[in-house]
Amino acid sequence: MRERQASQGARRDREFEAFVAGAAGRLLHTATLLTAEAPNANPRARRLLTLALAHTYACWDRLRGEDPYVRTRHHLALRFAHGAWHHYAHRARLRYAAFGRARPPVVGTLADLTPQERLVLVLRLYEGVAEEQTAALLGLPVERVRMLCDRATATLLHPPRGPAPAMTGAKATAS
């Protein structure tokens, strides 16, 4: 009996290791896009991925034909949504300097998006999840998912302008 359980455990571990070897890179990139961290400095993305993979490993035997990539992506998205949406209102664009720890800066073109817009955009465009599936996963109406994706796409295509450059020297006196 113990030998059989040990061999099943070893098989489970080999299957999970093969899954992680094939999927971890893409899932880490997805998590990095969600957190809008730099690819080489992404501790939040790595933590999200670690927790999602741990959840997938814990329920590996209960997948019963379900795609482990979809399960892990689902958990990754929900964990990001829970963490980001609950704290976004009072932490938007703030650093943790007041708490004695610095958060890696939000970088890249996705930094201009809200966490909700980022999540919908990454699921829809990078991961290729259908509107209906995204809406069901996030508990939002399909119209809201469509609006968030459209707004995020518009922000990426037409980023907000920065402040106008200051006038110096001769240009300032000519005015």
Image (cartoon, helix red, strand yellow):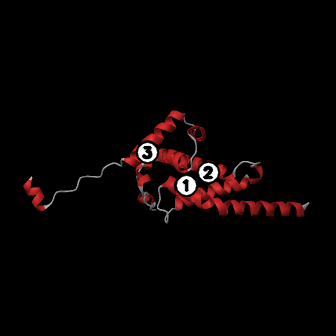
Mark 2 and mark 3 lie on one chain; the one further toward the N terminus is 2
Q: Quadrant of residue 152?
A: top left
Mark 1 and mark 2 lie on one chain; the one further toward the N terminus is 1
Q: Which quarter of the image is occupied by the N terminus?
A: bottom right
The residue indicated by pointer 1 is 30
Residue type at mark 3: give it. Thr
Furthest toward the right, the residue is 1
Circle 3 residues within 10 Å: few <14, some 14–19, many ≥20:
some
- Which label was assigned to residue 73? 2
Instruction: Report, in whole angstroms, how far the alpha carbon at label 3 lies from the one at label 1.
Output: 17 Å
Q: Nearer the viewer, residue 54 or 86?
A: 54
Residue type at mark 1: give it. Thr
Residue type at mark 2: give it. Arg
Left or right: where 21 falls relative to 128: right
Q: Position of residue 3 (x, y in %)?
A: 89, 64
- Which label was assigned to residue 135? none
What residue appears at the point 50 percent right and 46 percent down from the top-left corner? Answer: 121
What residue appears at the point 51 percent right and 33 percent down from the top-left corner? Answer: 143
Q: Position of residue 51 (x, y in %)?
A: 62, 56
Q: Quadrant of residue 25?
A: bottom right
Local SS, label 1: helix
The residue indicated by pointer 3 is 153
